[in-house]
Amino acid sequence: MSTGPFVAREAEVGRLAAALARADDGDPSLVLLGADAGVGKTRLLAHVGEIAAERGATTVTGACVDLGDVGLPYLPFAVALGQLHTHPATREAVEEVARTRPALVRLLPALGGAAPAPIEDQSSRLQLFDGIAAVLTAVAEATGPLLLVLEDLHWADPSTRDVLRYLVARLRDERLLVVGSYRTDDLHRTHPLRPFLSEMWRHPRVERLDLAPFTPAELRQFATVVHGSPLTDAELATVLERSEGNAYFAEELIAAGPTSATLPWSLGDVLRSRLERLPADVQSLARVASVAGRTVSEPLLRAVAEEHCPAEFEHLLREAMAANVLGWEDGRIAFRHALLAEAVYAELLPGEQVTLHRAFRDAILATPSLASSARLAHHARRCQDLPTALSASLRAADEAAGVVAPAEEHRHLETALRLWPSVPDAAELAGTTRVAVLERAASAASRSGDFPRAVALGREAVAEPGLGPVERAHLHTCLSRHLLGLEREHEALEQAELALAALPDDAPRGDRAWALATHARASLVRDRDDDARDSARRAVEEADAVCENAAAADALATLAVLVVDDADAAARLLVEARERAREAGDLVTEQRCQHNLVTTHYYAGRLDEAAADLEVAFARNREAGLEWSEFGMSQRFFDRLVRYCRGDLRPPEAIGPGHPVARAAQRDAALEPLVAVFDAVAVYSAVARGDEDAIARAQALRPMWERDSQVALLSGGPTIDALTWAGRLDEAVELATALVEHLGRSWDDYFLGGIWLAALALSALADGAEADRRVGVDPALKLRHGDELLERARATAERGRPRGGRLGPEGVAWLRRAEAEHSRLVGENDPALWRAAVAAFDYGYRYEVARSRWRLAEALLGAGDREAARTELDLAIAEARAMGARPLLEAATGLARRGRLEAGAPHRGEVLTEREAEVLELVAQGLTNRQIGERLFISGKTVSVHVSNVLAKLGVTGRAEAVAVAHRRGLLAG
């Protein structure tokens, strides 16, 4: 905080002004401004705020505060949102967002209405994060570019850092510039901001700006402004030597007197000299204020000062402000610099510190509205009032839970647990038991992502002596769920069994419902299906008896997995579970059920229904602010898979360093394979399109094979396919062999993906055998290898039991393809086997249907049935052309040329289904989906699915383009 005009720093101002200009053009970013204390961060940001105002931008500022090991979650964002809500120009935008995102009431009580009840899952936090991002976006759209300044990030609480991560991951085209400042000299080796900064700096929308001390030329300019006239060279040299270019130190040195003989030698001397020039009673006010930190509310400081300062409060405050020791900042009294507050506090004797902390404690206890429970806990601990610190820590945990800040809630609860043994009658004072605090701390740790600590706290809770049977059973259930989160499935099942064993016959039905539902989940992951089914059914009965919808939803979701071989029954259970979860406000279970609905329809071969399920999922995720939750990301993976299977070969969104999936992986190393999984699915369509870099992209994922076997399968399969298309047949077979061995070690010898890999390897072997025969080489070794592969595929189909015991449509289709490829390998190329492959893939796997038709045409041509071959080849060419599958198109047209078949002219009935052709005719007439639905007596949603199919089959992105392409290809009547 400075009172003089701004000078120097032209380069830094230029970079920040350029970033603001880019934000105005829809290119948002985060600038992280780092410097030592006193170098001039706040002064620079204030000047940039003035520039922003001149350009018509809105500027809001929020600062973090230092409260030691307690914290105020989301403080800088709460302050910034409060400023936006109170400003007439932005109030309406804030309230408009809040109407659809009630979670914002947690941070802005002034919005009115009751805050949503806290739900103990990550989804609640994501809703709040989405609301914060939506407010910033809406304000920027309504009023012009928005500059959000977040000061003192070195004091940021975990939740503030998490919001900033989320915000950066969401940046796309918002007119927003975020600038965060931090002290570099505070960042010790284990400081929590260090990994955060390292993570942020890798993001393409984050710019690092280091603010160095003044150069000699800049210091001369600055000193002239501060002093009112130029310093002599000798004076300037002395100031430079002692301040080392630190703006705040230099200003204090100059204010102390420009004569070198009187200049103090250290910053501490400087600060003491400033205070020593003040009257004693004003110094006493500064000492009182320093105990509260850099900033303090005026009512709280008044309450303490009136007891500990000899003069009238207003007079002392006016004198302190006139001396530029204190000032106003965001409606609070603030030291002109944090260094000054720290220096004043450090000068207090230990006894004085304790006395003043006790005074702040008493003031807050007398009038609780003066400060948060976290501040009360801070002062109580500093004055060794452990009972008050304990109760205040528990209330602070309640307040953190109220704003969905589980990391801070966890920390406050851990503080309470550390204090517990030192507080007599702690349970009576706290109004709860130590076991209850342990259970709650475990839950908060789990929700903040610290699963190992959640398990440790859960074990400590269940080991407490003197527990009643119901309480012990409940704790075993909770511990089981924490262990499931850590994927320690065997231990989770043990705890779930202990929970059931501990429950007495007269236990509350809600407790029994949760114990049974948890036992069902743990049994399911251990493949104890009968136990899982029995426990899940009993859980639903118990839950229904007491309207415990959340437990019922959890159990129904487990039952749905157990009947996955009956897609209709599984879907009914999942829809019921989803709606029960929604009624209970359990967003995680609701999202899990919707995700399982997608996968149920996908694995049942109902791709259109899976696509419709995904549309519902994405809409709900946007509404709930859960687009980038764990299930939200998994749904995006399946969206890529479903689009590919339905013939949409367009490149999906790239997962670059700034993509939310990549950001999640940077925060959690366990999620790194997730990026590779997304990249692997992108290779599917790249191979089908014939991209030149497809093989290199797939091979780049090879190092991830050891980390995640799913990456090995998803990337290895398309690599085999790409090598076969490229004619690198031996490499394709070698890779297939290596991949099967690798996955056999990781999973088992009969993993279901082995059928797919066998079919791909057989295709390469068949191509190689044909080449051998053309040059008179005996392909006996290839035939022997192919026999082994076919036998393995058939054995896997028999022994590699999917859940439900029945091979799904995709597995059946690849088995038919393997059999057909084997017939080609041995020189028979039986058309009947290829017809079986076409029929098997016709559940909706568009690309593989077209490829199988090409091979069927080849077999028919070899059998002398030219007309049937032309028909099949015509369809294959039309589909390959529509999808943009270049290698397949070239292979099919090459076959037509070699066989002298006139194939490739499009036929409407062969490219589109009858219903799709009807819909296209009405689209060409300009009808909307609703009007088309009324005309054809189908729903608008079904029309939307047909339109999407038409766009995909024609390889276009819009309705007008579809009509134009259809006209050119003769697919429209008249």
Image: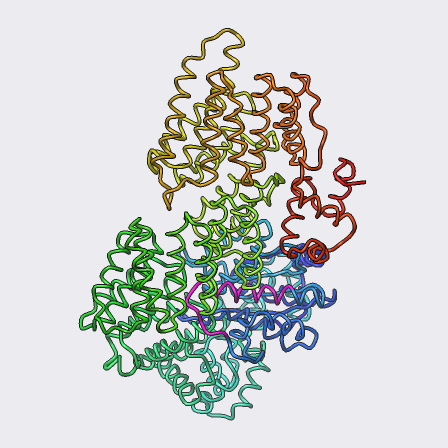
| Quadrant including the N terminus | bottom right
Please name the predominant secondary structure of the magenta segment in the image: helix
Q: Nearer the viewer, residue 683 or 868?
A: 868
Residue 131, magenta (yes or no): yes
For residue 187, side relative to residue 616 (left or right): left
Residue 806 on image: x %, y %: 39, 42
Name the colour scheme: rainbow
For residue 89, side relative to residue 576 (left or right): right
Query: Residue 34 lies in what quarter of the image?
Result: bottom right
Residue 579 on image: x %, y %: 48, 65
User: Going 49% across and 25% down the picture, which residue do you hit?
Assistant: 820
Residue 266, magenta (yes or no): no
Residue 483 on image: x %, y %: 31, 57
Tell me, yes or no, if residue 909 can be seen here: yes
Residue extending furthest toward the top = 776
Query: Residue 499 lies in what quarter of the image?
Result: bottom left
Residues shaded magenta: 116-137
Residue 323 on image: x %, y %: 57, 80
Q: Nearer the viewer, residue 967 or 248?
A: 967
Residue extending furthest toward the left = 466
User: Going 69% across and 45% down the picture, which residue do you hit?
Assistant: 957
- Looking at the rendered structure, the number of numbered marks drawn on it comes to 0
Tell me, yes or no, if residue 18 can be seen here: no
**Above or below: residue 908 compared with residue 248:** above
